[in-house]
Amino acid sequence: MPPSSFHPDWIRPQWPAPAHIHALCTSRAGGVSVAPYDSLNLGDHVGDVPQAVQTNRQRLQMALQTDTPQTQAQTQAVFLRQVHGVQTIHLAAGLSDGLCADACVTTAIGPVCTIMVADCLPVLFTDRQGRAVAAAHAGWRGLADGVLESVWQAFCTALLGPEATAAAQKALAPSTLAWLGPCIGPTAFEVGAEVQQAFCAHHPAAAAHFQQQTGQQGKYLADLAALARQRLQGLGITQIYGNDSSAGWCTVNNPSHFFSHRRDAVRWGGSGRMAACIWRSQP
């Protein structure tokens, strides 16, 4: 991969975002790491050679900068320390990596909201005017505990101010865009009864997205992307793009394209991480 260009294997969201909103999701292609992290592993916490991770992150950073050459501010991916929680932080220019959070939002030009995944669901946000961007790491635990609700509240605060009313937030939702990236798919995500109960306790209709395994008491196949869509719709966000739960989006069942912790950690002892990124340039 030429270090100053996007790898053709990376995903560009197909959504009606304004031209000054930029977004991508990397795949496992385009880096220098060796198996089982081959090749564009962006995670510095999974056992990969640190120099390889640094080189991979530099390739991503150069690609981001190339995509917005007219931006005076330095386009910079900010990597979080994700803990499967619900904390959302506001990114400003100059923030360093390693802040503990599972979602981020910014109205600034320069910081890139960046979420690492390898089965969990990345969710990107902007509005029709492109005034703010946000990203969330939605594994089952964070999704059940309210990470999408947390980032939505932060997104509303960024655009409407801390005193925004519920009515103002409701009015913003129809003009908000959400994009869902690749994640573990509904034919691969086997979970226990505690996961099903965690979602159904919040909303009984979530039961529709769990399929009980034949002959296995307390075992279900869960549709993580559908559960996220349901949560977003509950917030009033209906313009939802990307992962539709079809086979091509499944990280587990597309090993040449995506990293998967569930697939690779037991078999190979580790798995790399992809990144979903969203950022603003000058309108």
Image (tube, grey):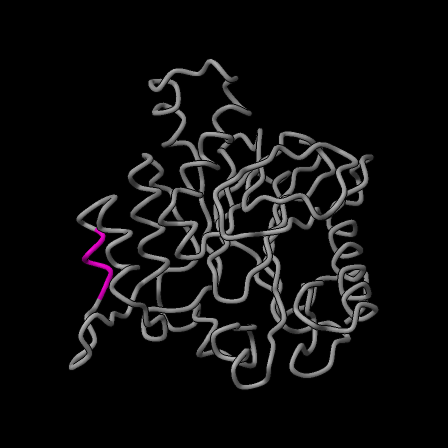
* Residue sitting at x 36%, y 75%: 188
Residue most toward the bottom?
267
Taking 177 as reference, is 223 left or right? Answer: left
Quarter of the figure that contains the N terminus: bottom right
Taking 8 as reference, is 156 left or right? Answer: left
Q: What stretch is highlighted in magenta?
A: 206-210
Q: Choose between 280 and 47: the one closer to the eye.
A: 47
Residue 78 lies, in percent from the top left, at 70, 46
Taking 115 as reference, is 62 left or right? Answer: right
Say which quarter of the image contains residue 60.
Answer: bottom right
In this picture, is 198 found above or below 210? Answer: above
Q: Choose between 2 and 267: the one closer to the eye.
A: 267
In this picture, is 258 found above or below 281? Answer: below
Q: Does the magenta stretch include residue 209?
A: yes
Quarter of the figure that contains the C terminus: top right
User: How would you classify the magenta stretch by its main secondary structure?
Assistant: helix
